[in-house]
Amino acid sequence: MTRFSAMSLFAKALGGHQGWPEQWPDAAPKPAYDAIIVGGGGHGLGAAYYLAKKYGITKVAVLEKGWIGGGNTGRNTTIIRSNYLYDESAHLYDHAVKLWDGLSQELNYNTMYSKRGVMMLAHNVHDIQSFKRHIHANRLNGVDNEWLTPEEAKAYCPPLNISPDARYPVLGAALQRRGGTARHDTVAWGYARAAAALGVDIIQNCAVTGINRGPDGAVTGVETTRGSIACKRIGVSAAGNTSVLMQMAGLDFPLESYPLQALVSEPVKPIFPCVVMSNTVHAYMSQSDKGELVIGAGTDQYVSYSQRGALHIVEHTLAAICEIFPIFRRMRMLRTWGGIVDVTPDRSPILGKTPVQGLYVNCGWGTGGFKATPGAGDLLAYTMAKDEPHRINAPFNLDRFRNGRLIDEAAAAAVAH
Amino acid sequence: MTGYRLPMGGRVNRQTQLAFRFDGATYAGFEGDTLASALLANGVQLFGRSFKYHRPRGLLGAGSEEPNALISVTRGPGRFTPNLRATSIDLYDGLEASSQNRWPSLKFDLGAINDRLGMFFPAGFYNKTFMWPRSFWEKLYEPAIRRMAGLGHPPTEEDPDHYAATYAHCDVLIIGAGPAGIDAALEAASGNGRVILIDEQDELGGGALSDPALWPWLDRSVKALAASPNVTVLTRTTAFGYFHDNFIGAVERLTDHLADVPHGPREKLWRIRAGEVILAQGAIERPLVFDGNDTPGVMLASAARVFALRFGVAVGRSIALMASHDSGWHDIFALAKTGVGIAAIVDVRDAVSPDLLAQAEALGIPVHLGHSVIGVRGRLGVKAISIARNGGTGVADLACDALLMAGGWTLTVHLWSHSKGTLAWRDDLGAYVPDQPNENVRCVGACAGAWSFGDGAVIDILPTPKDPTRAKAFVDFQNDVTAKDIKLAVREGFRSIEHIKRYTTNGMATDQGKTSNLNGLQIASTALNRPVADIGLTTFRPPYTPQTFGALAGHAKGPLFQPTRKTNIDSWAEENGAVFELVAQWRRARYFPKAGEDMHAAVNRECRMVRSSVGIFDASTLGKIEVVGPDAAEFLNRMYTNPWKALEPGRCRYGLLLKEDGFITDDGVSARLAADRFHLTTTTGGAARVLNMMEDYLQTEWPDLNVWLTSTTEQYAVIALQGPNARKVLEPLVEGIDLSAEAFPHMAVREGTICGIPTRLFRVSFTGELGFEINVPSAYGRALWERIMAEGARFDITPYGTEAMHVLRAEKGFIIVGQDTDGTVTPQDAGLDWAIGKKKPDFVGKRSLARPDIVAPGRKHLVGLLTEDPNVVLEEGAQIVADPNQPVPMTMIGHVTSSYWSEALGRSIAMALVVDGQNRMGQSLFIPMPGQTHVAKVSSMVFYDAEGARLNV
Ligand SMILES: Cc1cc2nc3c(=O)[nH]c(=O)nc-3n(C[C@H](O)[C@H](O)[C@H](O)COP(=O)(O)OP(=O)(O)OC[C@H]3O[C@@H](n4cnc5c(N)ncnc54)[C@H](O)[C@@H]3O)c2cc1C
């Protein structure tokens, strides 16, 4: 692997950039691997990297039906934060956020993780109660999250409208300063390059069409559009398509897949210094390094595998953005798109073993799994290497839907009375 | 340079001169000009600076595909708009425009240093560097990158304009009003169906607007369409997105072209559902890729034609053409006929049709076949070009002041692709054409590949003897993506066209690759040594051109963003000084301060009056559902945890509703009015959710049940009268209902009249006092309220708000779903086991209540908390620990859900969810707050009148 640095960039520039090698080779499938990861998103590529790096399992293939990072990894609004309520979630996401710090250096690939701060707006008494609950829980868990008055919130994010006459006035905000954004593609590419350097095969245009099992029920390999591949350990990390893959192993997964949309504005000069989220008004926004306002929209009401959503969702999102940030009403929407998010009944992920020996799963991240990318990859790798979950992901097992030990963050945000 | 307006021709109105300003200088143009044509007429070639290298740029195109000429327009306070295309800005008198992304000026831009250093900023450079030292990314590198990036400045003031939105339905929707679209519209118009024809330009005609021979036909057609009653024509309207089931979004621009901003909406969103869609979006000419192809004055041949024939403006005095396609020759011939000087035709092909050569000869135009432009001289405008024979080394210089590019055509298949129609590659056209439709849609005209522009050669990069690593041959002009960048991406292993796009940002600028996608694809194809068809195409995404946020938000602004729901009594509260709070979409009176009172004092007084005399409360926001039908009781029995079948008509019951997962989702007191009729109440925020949930079960799980559900939330105003004197206030007003304790016990319902108004009168209490809830038709709410106020004056009747209501109910240990429960709380956890019908075979959530973890010990229970210091009112949301001295991360065992000062008890009270709380009665727990740890004892949740003596009077 050619190390990336200002020096190497300078040196290669003098050679007209002819000397750059492939960031990862275009591997063709081999007949057998020690471990296969299905899904070349950030999570899957991360898992492959950590399998090789931390656990010495290098005969690994990542099978991606399209192009790596082309799923939700390359479609999300990249909000990173860890101020979750429950201990289980706080530990899971904080594990990831700690890995984000230093990821660029670890991968020798600038993932552009930018701790711009994530501010969540409170618009009614109920929001205040809920955010205070989060802040106090985070404080005692050692996770940073602080309360801001409307004036402090405005100072942190000047475009914010804090007029008390607004339809949903801002009554305060919860701020996690360590939260922020990263550049989505580079996360996938950075992991792919680093994993490939350790011997992992990154195989694109290779869709898994079947999961093979032996007489004892354990997995023996996969069928793909590029032939059969043998292997005793399969990690499925296929986001919106996970339920389809699980069915190939005869497992019915508690997942529903919905289109979730996002959009960007035309690029403008810096105006928006942080990330702002409003769950009550349904507005999520940051500004990219390129200058686009990056805006998260909602999910369609109906389940679907079609990566496009309905117009009225976008209308509602922009109405919300213009309410909270009225100066942006004349800005223009440049591009919209959708991704398929996999949602579990308690909106927390499933990360661990499955009832099928040798089959591991990482799914159910729904609308919020980008922030978990390094953590999810690391924990899936651990679980596959040790054939048992790490302490951090143990609570996120499949069994909780049977025994009732749910981790329901969304419910904890509760409903207005 | 001045005076590029041709002596005659064009569709501009030379009688009406318009004055406008660009970067502070004043110019004149004509009615019918765009900003682009008017500036060109004044000899302006330099329009902007590119995104990354800040290279000087002129116009590339003449329409909405323009990547370079991005302009900010300001028209008074709040009306600043960045990133508009000069080619799409209709000129008006007084237009105030400025260039962008340059400092200090357009001609002299310090950012152009990036261009000199360009070799260090190839595609993806930022992935490879800025990593050390770690903290510098956020502090130094990123802010620097951000300052350089961005196009125009953002608006900084609130937009005073407003925006409209509408729905439309039609049998045939035609998008694009060039000749093909107009023909399709005329044909559709002859039928009976409703037809809508839309076009993004200010007049119909498309390509015909720059073809004077077609103008008589165009005139006739436009008149015929205008005369057809079944045809709606929308100009200045962009169909920006194609959604499921022939649903098209379009935005009409209503005022941006007017000198004075009228009092109407600026733009209007059209949401069109069409039976059939006909796409006639045409095609866009492709630039050629060679060193210096971005110099101001280098533009598409078709654009030069539009400027000359539609606007009467020459793009130069001595114009050269670089072609790989016949269409450019025809454009040059048309230009020559307007009298513009033509320097030469250069064509990369070795041979073209003799007819073209003959025409060139007749017009006296020098022709260089088998040649390519290999360089352009002039930084702020073309001065000369260098050409070389393909494969040769000899270079010749040709003086000219404009260079046209004719690289063939790219079909405009954006909307087709939005609709998920498939595309097929056609080698003969060198373009993707529509293949299989996915909706009821077809393409006609150029966007279907049916054009008559002649032949061409498909070429990725023009041959050059120069070192290609030194060339600046642009593919995506706005994003400064060069051919080198695309080759670099391929070299670095990016093979999918989507990866190449993302790595280089080719096609991701505000023109979304209208002029760059196909060239990028060709270059990638050569670099990968694979046919274009194997590489695919990036996905087109809505919108076709950028659309204003405000237009998409439409009317949903300020008070209309989401209507504030107000009760019939709300106006009284407002007149009487209430302080409001928002609850779901409602606003509710929170408290009624008297002069000099703060919230605390007001709430204390309100609570005191309810407990000692009588209070009046607007409970109209409670959700209400009328459940009717022979199976109504059976239905409720299955929905709620409680038994309903034995409930007698005239009686009420507290109902508890779980989700499938066994957790509490709603509650409310409901009444049985008759054997087959119930009046349900839900929480204020839960009304819609509960009705949806019930309909869902009714329609999908139990369609056999004979039950109808009707939302009646807004049909009733509800006045709660609470306190020991409530009955005395009510008695004189009610007719036909015996209010005595014996005849009308707690948890009963009666129908009768009050002040002559029909009422459903509930005897219920959320305060623990003798209480009534009076339901009357909404319109009578305020009148009745005032009547009761008058009647209650002798008891000093006191209006109270939600805050006092919360305190009063907490004193009694009544829960608020969503505050004391959070979607993880079972009935047992909340101490509500009594509300579960133990003998019922089933109800929603029953099975989940038996799950191992739900019955395991150690769950959180809802309990009371009394602080050691009675004056400390805990913060709601505060966390509870058993051991305050442990290090962080601490083991938290619960949190405070409700907490108030209780006037009745003269101390603070709180409710909390605590692990194993019901078995911790009397135990001291700790609430560590910043700087201080509070101590509190676990207690019962019922703090006041535990026996309920005050209720049953
Ligand atoms: C619009 C949008 C906005 C979002 N915003 C945020 C945000 O702000 N913050 C946040 O934290 N999260 C956000 N998310 C969620 C986040 O994107 C995802 O949770 C996360 O990226 C999931 O990563 P992944 O690697 O698991 O999935 P993906 O990146 O989707 O990867 C799964 C891969 O599996 C492949 N695959 C599927 N089936 C097969 C098969 N049969 N064979 C082979 N390969 C297959 C797919 O092609 C895909 O590449 C958002 C999501 C969307 C759609």
Image (cartoon, helix red, strand yellow):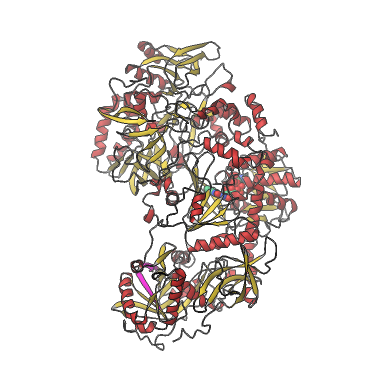
Q: How far across and how far down the image is residue B123, in percent?
A: 58, 32
B915 magenta-colored: no
In this rendering, the count of numbered labels is 0
Which residue is at 47% across, 81% downward?
A: B646
Which is more toward the observer, A357 or B381? B381
Which is more toward the observer, B789 or A205? B789
Q: Is residue B179 left or right of residue A65?
A: left
Rendered position, A266 above or below B904: above
Q: How far across and how far down the image is residue A184, in percent?
A: 58, 43
Q: Is residue B779 left or right of residue A207?
A: left
Residue A408 in sight = no
Q: How far across and how far down the image is residue B184, in percent?
A: 33, 36
Residue B762 found in image quarter: bottom left
Rendered position, A208 above or below B791: above
Residue B688 in sight = yes
Q: Which residues are magenta?
A: B710-721
B713 magenta-colored: yes
